Amino acid sequence: MNASTTSPPPSPTPRPLALKVLAAMFALFLVLVLVISFFPWDVLRGPINRYVSEKTGRKFEITRHLDIGFGLRAATVKFDGIEFSNPSWARDPYLVKADRAEFDIRLWPLLAKKVVIPRLSLTSPVFGLQMEQDGRRTWALGKDTSDTSTAPIIGLLQVDGGAGDFLAKHLGVDLHVDFNFDTSRGQMPLDYKIKGTYQKQPLTAVGRTGNVLQLNATGAPPFPLVVKATAGHTTLGVNGTVAELSTLEGIDAKFDIKGQNLGDLFPLLGIALPQTSPYALKGELRKNGKVWSVTAMNGKLGLSDIGGDMKFDQGKQLPYLSGALRSRVMDMDDLGPLIGLPPTERSANAVEGVVPPPNITQVKKARRDPGTRVLPTAPLDFERLRAMNADVSYVADRITNVRQVPLDRGSVKVKLADGVLTLDPLDLGVASGRIGGAIRIDAAKSPADIRASLDVRGMQLNRLIPKIQTLKASFGKLDGRVNLSGQGNSVASWLATASGDIAAITGKGEFSNLLLEFLGLDGGEIIKFLLKGDHTVTLRCGAVALNVDKGLMSTRTIVLDTDDTVFNATGNASFVTESLDFVIKAQPKDMSILSLRTPLTIKGTFGSPKPFVELTSLAGRGLAALALGAINPLLALAATIETGPGQDADCQGVLADAQRPGVGAAATGAVKAKTAKTATVVQ
């Protein structure tokens, strides 16, 4: 008999340990979510207030309610009422005080004690921001407020009305801003008004922007910004977009700016621009990293137009300005401020909406007072040349209002490197010829070391001396050179120390005979030409060579030879006192009656030269005429008859002598000046 057996049922398969752990973690997470979701966070308001106050050393208080919502990477914190005091050294009592505050805070950076707030929203806030020269700042959250690592990083800032103050005495900044939020304004619901001082100049500004300000929101789309600001006599308008407000990164805007003097922008923007007449400029402004660029710029500098493109790179060891500028028409009056002269009344009133500079009164006074010094004495601010480097070219297609100096056109390459400014090449069209060369200013020294080396080619004398042109004279052409070196912080102080040489020569041409006779005081010839009309005589040659020794300019050669008269001059002129002391002797080559030719002296000052006739020689002729006139009046004419002893000058020798360099200090100064054209510095 077979016995039957029954197999036991299979046992259940045990679950893996990993699955159990995962389930437990999920359950724990679910519990945590429920706890966090329903946790009464407000009970922690007191402990949080005490903790933050203890860690920062100043009062922190959530005044009404606290709520927190957690995510995987950040938490959203809501304060119903917040008061966070400033350090005791600050002017304003609160860093921030607001009716409501809501912000996102990154969790993982907290482990490294870094506070990263991608978004901050405040309702009716009051800010009190302040920084000191020693590095202390009110928004640093540690007890050591000079430790910048404790300052929070804020991305987006949204405010619904409110006000704020920013104070930085060492920067000359003290600003107050009022915010007003109105959703009916479309894409730019937030407007603001700013009032205070910036770089110790009064500042006001009004503007509008989007509802969210991107302080450090890298990669976020740009937000719109409109602002119109006035600092001192400078007015700036900007309309465009900006990506980050803290660094103005990604700015792309149109701008217009007006002011009394481009040089005033140095304390405001840190750009060392030249002194100018009032200006008005427009263009497009962009910022990429540390590089600011201005394109399609156009406008006015005084009476002149100007346009071009510029770049300002703040990423280098010294900021670097580069670009190319051009004027279709440049007015001569606008050159004065470059060398320390105040703008003329024409230039000062050329830009509508800009108050004329106060120093315009100096121009009016100078016109009334012929004794006013001619050379510019205003100190030139060479110290700012050490604040940046530059490489800028400028071209003026046509120059107008030339008056005494008939400039036709001009161009210059401006380079600034480590406090040394060079204008090289400098090319000016003057009187149908040209002046070319270089000027070098070493602002690293005090007083500045200044060197000028200029060559003159082919200038037409009838254009160079307008008074002769009115006598219908037709001169030849003038060549020459100027080599001067010295030290100074103004044009006047530089020339007062300068040494070097100045020379000019001209070959065959024509000269007004009537002017010659006036210079020689020939009464008979003057009467004759007044009755019969003026005509010209041949100019055989002319040469001027002057030595300059520490501001004293003395003659080496001054000769003007015509087929009528030979003129020789001796004397000196002082750049120190601006005084003149020359004697001009005329030796006629013809015979004439009624001649009172005696040496002509020129004294006085640069601003008021005074010509005199030497009385001793003239008196001798007068006494002779009086004695002969007592015998017979007709015999009195014999004392004024000129027998014409003059001889032709050795033109070849005269021109060769003018071309030779000077000696002594003049020669040394001239050699030093020529280094303005090279990179070699001669001490």
Image (spheres, rainbow, N blue to C red):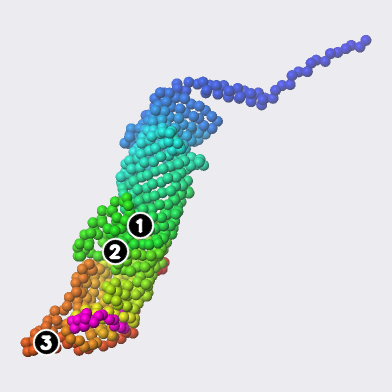
What is the x, y in percent for residue 350?
32, 56
* Disc 3 residue type (three-letter): Ala
Q: Is residue 228 above or below residue 583?
A: above
Looking at the image, which residue sits at the far top? 1
Q: Residues within 10 Å of mark 3 (few under 14, many from 20)?
A: many
Residue at numbered disc 2: 491
Q: Is residue 225 magenta?
A: no
- Residue nearer the viewer, 409 or 617: 409
Name the residue at 41% across, 30% down. Answer: 123
Highlighted range, magenta: 522-543
> Toward which corner of the image does residue 4 lie, by quadrant?
top right
Q: Are marks 2 and 1 in contact (CB under 8 Å)?
A: no
Mark 1: secondary structure? strand
Q: Residues within 10 Å of mark 1 (few under 14, many from 20)?
A: many
Mark 2: secondary structure? helix
- In-image side of 148 versus 638 (left or right): right
Looking at the image, which residue sits at the far left? 630
- The tag earlier along the polypeptide, 2 or 3, is 2
Residue at numbered disc 3: 636
Q: Nearer the viewer, mark 3 or mark 1?
A: 3
Question: What numbered label is drawn on residue 301?
Answer: 1
- Residue nearer the viewer, 220 or 302: 302
Q: Nearer the viewer, mark 2 or mark 3?
A: 3
What is the x, y in percent for residue 320?
43, 55
Q: Is residue 214 above or below residue 62?
A: below
Disc 2 and disc 1: Cα gap in Å? Answer: 22 Å
* Disc 2 residue type (three-letter): Val
